[in-house]
Image (cartoon, rainbow, N blue to C red):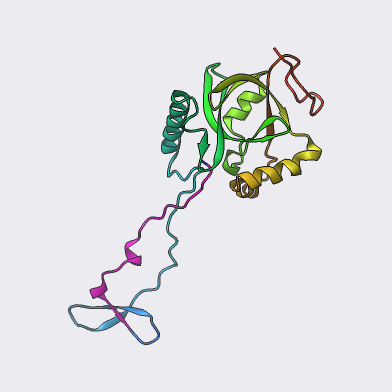
Amino acid sequence: MLVSCLIGHPDPWLNPSPSSWSQKPGGQPNRVDSRTRSIRPEPVRAPHHPRATVNEGGFQNMANWLAFTRAHCVVYRGTRGWIGANLIGIHMLLLTTRGRKTGKPRTLPLAYIEHKGDLVVVASNGGALNPPAWWLNLRDSDSAEVQVGNERFEIGWAHAPKDERMEYWRGLQAAIPAYRMYRLRTDREIPIVLLQRKSEGWPTRRLESGSIAPPS
């Protein structure tokens, strides 16, 4: 999900038939007129740049991305994290929030690291200008559910402390190098979100004044 790729599209002008081309001194190609056998200069064309699709996870379109996300959730749930909790060396969790408009549960896989007892996720949205929907849902609620491997539990959330953001970024980029590219794509401040298990005595520590949602 965090690997980006370019998918090129072939162009006939880049792959002409070998029999229809000759080479003049200097390496510039010319078109051979089959009727007169004379060589006429090939018209000058603007440089061609193959079209490409860039999408988080290497998918060519949003439909494929959504289908993969749904399949990932189903397999993760069905195998209780045996499959899907580790994706190409990256730790994955399932986050379930309530849609802020529909009130319906929304589950999706997120990459995370562990730091100081918290599960750390990033609302990067692949470096898009707008934040991801899961973050908007979580921000407007007082709790959500997380599955890590075969464990499911209720969590609260907090922003990473401002004076520790660079420390968090170093750890995140070391574990998930794609985050470096996502930061370069956007001018918005990407939220670093700390997920904490709700239990007796929760929250265990206050990170920023007012940043931790009160326990329900």
- Tell me residue 200's x, y (percent): 72, 14
- Does residue 85 belong to the magenta stretch? no
Please report the residue visible at 49 percent of the width from the left and 48 percent of the height from the top. 54
Give the residue at the far left of this rendering.
35
Please report the residue visible at 48 percent of the width from the left and 50 percent of the height from the top. 5
Please report the residue visible at 77 percent of the width from the left and 22 percent of the height from the top. 204
- Tell me residue 153's x, y (percent): 60, 19
Asked whether residue 186 is in view, the answer is no
Give the residue at the far top of this rendering.
216
Horizontal relation, residue 12 to residue 128: left or right = left
Task: Tell me the quarter of the picture where residue 99 sits.
Answer: top right
Number of marks drawn: 0
Tell which of 106 and 62 is nearer to you: 106
Vertical position of residue 75 compared to residue 188: above or below: above
Part of the protein shown in magenta:
2-23
Tell which of 191 and 144 is nearer to you: 144
Please report the residue visible at 53 percent of the width from the left and 19 percent of the height from the top. 105
Task: Tell me the quarter of the picture where residue 190 sits.
Answer: top right
- Tell me residue 21's x, y (percent): 28, 76
Tell which of 121 and 17 is nearer to you: 121
Horizontal relation, residue 168 to residue 4: left or right = right
Asked whether residue 89 is in view, the answer is yes
Q: Quadrant of the C terminus?
A: top right
- Tell me residue 76's x, y (percent): 47, 28
